[in-house]
Image: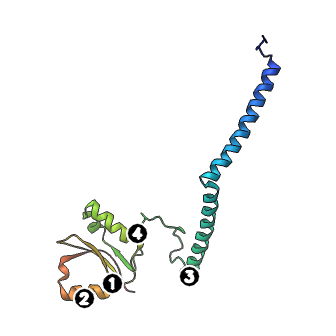
């Protein structure tokens, strides 16, 4: 029988050979898995989306420049940036809402209001609605506006 005791040189050669084979197998199987799960394609598509989103952002900045220069370019959805000259946000009313109602109001607040719109809650049904200036006048004429509490309004300049 052959002696299986390897000297330090033979052990070192075997170890290097094993590491090289392991690396080659890893690279080979990595490419197979990336091809099978379409990972490379997903990465290239994500990169294209980033380029398109940057173009859209650049276009939006050129069409509608940021009126407040000390704001960040992208405002987090949870942050409420309110220009006091044209907008009234009634924090005490917002704080009095239930967590479910606050979450519903946040959906409207996240997307903002157009000039003249109001975000209101019905006192009896607790429904939150966004009304334009025309719709609000119709509601006030048809019903009494005492049934509604204004959460946020964007005034006409």
- Dot 2 or dot 1: first in sequence order is 1
Q: Who is closer to the viewer here, 112 or 154? A: 112
Q: Kindly identify the residue that appears in the image at 37 percent across and 68 percent down.
A: 107
The residue under the point 33% across, 63% down is 103
Percent across and percent down for residue 9 are 82, 20
Image coords of residue 97 (percent x, y): 25, 64
Task: Tell me which numbered mark, 1 or 4, is placed earlier along the sequence.
Answer: 4
- Mark 1–mark 4 contact, CB under 8 Å? no
* Horizontal side of residue 135 vs 27, given as left or right: left
Query: Circles 2 and 4: CB distance less than 8 Å?
Result: no
| Other residues around mark 3 within 10 Å, as few (<14) / some (14–19) / many (≥20) | few
Which residue position is annotated with label 3?
63
Name the residue at 23% across, 85% down.
139
To which residue does mark 1 refer? 132
The secondary structure type at the circle numbered 1 is loop
The residue that disc 4 covers is 110
Whole-number angstrom distance, CA of label 2 to CA of label 3: 33 Å
State how far apart marks 2 and 1 are (Cα): 10 Å
Residue 120 image point, x, y percent: 27, 75
The tag earlier along the polypeptide, 2 or 3, is: 3
Q: Secondary structure at mark 2?
A: helix
Query: Which residue is the site of mark 2?
Result: 138
The residue positioned 64% from the left and 56% from the top of the image is 40
CA–CA distance between discs 1 and 3? 24 Å
């Amino acid at each position: 029988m052959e002696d299986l005791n390897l000297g330090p040189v033979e052990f070192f050669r075997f170890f290097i050979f094993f590491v090289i084979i392991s690396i080659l197998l890893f690279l080979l199987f990595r490419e197979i898995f990336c091809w099978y799960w379409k990972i490379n394609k997903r990465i290239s598509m994500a990169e294209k989306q980033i380029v398109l989103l940057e173009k859209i952002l650049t276009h939006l900045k050129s069409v509608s420049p940021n009126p407040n220069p000390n704001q960040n370019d992208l405002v987090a959805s949870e942050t409420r940036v309110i220009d006091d000259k044209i907008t009234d946000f009634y924090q005490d009313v917002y704080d009095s809402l239930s967590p479910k109602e606050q979450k519903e109001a946040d959906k409207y607040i996240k997307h903002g209001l157009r000039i003249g719109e109001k975000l209101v809650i019905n006192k009896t049904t607790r429904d939150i609605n966004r009304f334009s200036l025309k719709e609000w006048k119709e509601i006030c004429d048809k019903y009494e506006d005492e049934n509604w509490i204004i959460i946020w309004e964007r005034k006409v300049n």
